[in-house]
């Protein structure tokens, strides 16, 4: 099971759905936050590639992991920085081969264009069931 967001807080319904699915299937849950890495070499030199998640985002990621652990699910958390976060998410899904990908960014946190582009890429390119928040 893969629960993913793109640098924004997770939707509570997505968190519950992913955790419930992992519990019912008896499978581990991977909670992934894929964030955009500014494509400037100076960003890496100055350490801007190491910025922490926003407090709201960190809270929802931690809450989903804690809920899953409390129900006996093995949890792995990933934070991936990439100049192309959607492509990175697709790569993660390709490597992990989850039975279910829950794309769970909180409604209204991504622009409509960014969300539409991400949803299209996910539904066109992953070989598993997909659940979309919002």
Image: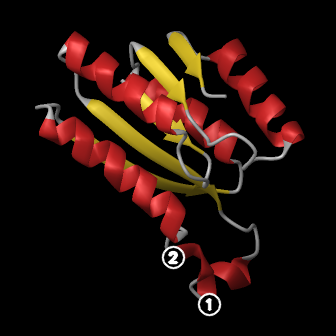
Residue 50: give its label.
Answer: 2
Find the residue positioned furthest to the front.
Answer: 12
Task: Specify how the rendered protein is coloured.
Answer: secondary structure
Question: Which of the pair 119/109 is nearer the observer?
Answer: 109
Disc 2, SS:
helix
Query: Is 80 situated above or below 49?
Result: above
Which quarter shows the C terminus? top right
Circle 1 — which element? loop
Query: Vertical placement of 74 versus 94: above or below?
Result: below
Q: Could you give the CA–CA distance between mark 2 and mark 1, rounded to whole angstroms?
A: 9 Å
State whether residue 111 is above or below residue 123: below
Picture residue at 54% right of the left edge, 77% below the top: 51
Q: Residue furthest bottom?
A: 46
x%, y% of residue 22? 27, 21
* Residue 65, picture quadrant: top left
Q: Is residue 112 left or right of residue 89?
A: right
- Give the class, few, some or many, for how many residues have Cα within 10 Å of label 1's Cα (few <14, many ≥20): few
Q: Position of residue 36 (x, y in %)?
A: 67, 58
From the viewer's side, name the closer residue of 76 and 83: 76
Q: List the residue tagged with mark 1.
A: 46
Q: Do the residues labelled 2 and 1 touch (CB within 8 Å)?
A: no
Task: Find residue 90 and report its horizontal and vertical position in percent.
Answer: 59, 30
Quadrant position of residue 70? top left
Residue at left 71%, top 48%? 84
Residue at figure coordinates x 51%, y 9% from the top left: 129
Residue 113: percent from left, percent from top: 89, 38
């Amino acid at each position: 099971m893969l629960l993913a967001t793109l640098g924004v807080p997770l939707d509570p319904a997505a968190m519950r759905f992913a955790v419930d699915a992992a519990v019912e299937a008896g499978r581990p849950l991977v909670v992934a936050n894929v964030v955009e890495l500014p494509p400037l070499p100076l960003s890496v030199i100055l350490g801007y590639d190491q910025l922490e998640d926003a407090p709201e985002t960190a809270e929802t990621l931690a809450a989903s992991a804690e809920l899953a652990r409390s129900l006996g699910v093995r949890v792995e958390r990933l934070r991936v920085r990439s100049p192309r976060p959607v492509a990175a998410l697709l790569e993660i899904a390709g490597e992990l081969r989850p039975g279910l990908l829950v794309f769970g960014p909180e409604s209204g946190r991504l622009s409509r264009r960014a969300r539409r582009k991400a949803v299209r890429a996910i539904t066109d390119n992953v070989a598993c069931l997909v659940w979309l928040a919002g």
